[in-house]
Amino acid sequence: MVRSRFTWCAVLALVLAGCTQTTSGQAQSGGAPVSGDGGAKASESAAPSTTSAAPQSSSYPSTDGVTATIATMTVRLPADTQYAVESRDPGYEGCLQSPAFACEGKILDLRAAADEGMINLPDAHRQYGWYPGTDVPTCIGPAADPGTGSEATGSTLLESGFAPVGPKKAEYARFQETCQEPAQNNQIRMWWLPQSKILVVEHASTPELDTAFDRMLASATFS
């Protein structure tokens, strides 16, 4: 990837233009089974699958929880997490934060930044397709917070296709990320809604975190 004078930190103000106040999750979210596009426009479904099928929609028990609204999307947050709209430390904006993991993933409103042409649009076929910055990403994990992880050295697409986000379908991909510090190698999942211009990224995928993100996204509603 060619480095640019515009780094991801330089466009965070635009990225967060449509976000709401930070909220904290109290319970895992529930969502009804998703069938089809649920009225989403065709552009919300983007490109066909390239490797293997994305996760199918699932039915989760309905429980009460705190919601966060990012741009036009509202989701129920996983238990014991908060959505960081603003942060004193660059790189944490948009993070889902828990006591054990400073940035389990990010939910980003990319409308303004995309309109300004200051980012790389998410794309399963790009090496760091989950990363909209124009510099090289760092490897984020439970022991490597944003800005402290080693630089990524590569990523390999493991699967791609479509996955449900509430009533919509998103571009979905899973990547194997390699890092200068091999202990930080991890898998990353992304969901990209190209019409809504909302990006969801899950860092350092584990089965437990996968379940939490799938439940959160199953709960999504759109205004």
Image (cartoon, rainbow, N blue to C red):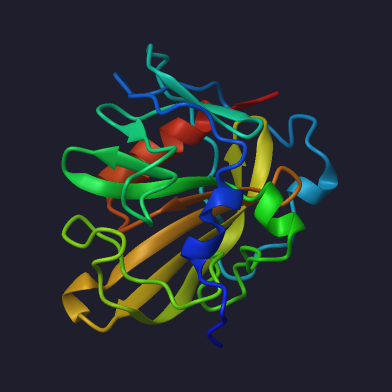
Residue with the most extreme top position = 64
Report x, y in % for residue 129: 55, 69
**What residue appears at the point 39 percent right and 18 percent down from the top-left corner?**
66
Q: Which one is nearer the viewer's eye here, 221 or 51?
A: 221
Determine whether 12 is above or below 76 in the image. below
Residue with the most extreme right position = 42
Q: Quadrant of residue 62?
A: top left
Q: Quadrant of the C terminus?
A: top right
Determine whether 25 is above or below 42 in the image. above
Report x, y in % for residue 222: 67, 27
Q: Quadrant of residue 189?
A: bottom left
Determine whether 150 is above or below 23 in the image. below
Question: Horizontal placement of 163 versus 79: left or right?
Answer: right
Report x, y in % for residue 97: 29, 40
Q: Which one is nearer the viewer's eye here, 86 or 107?
A: 86
Question: Horizontal placement of 52 versus 113: left or right?
Answer: left
**What residue appears at the point 66 percent right and 64 percent down from the top-left corner?**
121
Q: Report the number of numbered marks.
A: 0
**What residue appears at the point 52 percent right and 63 percent down from the top-left corner?**
10
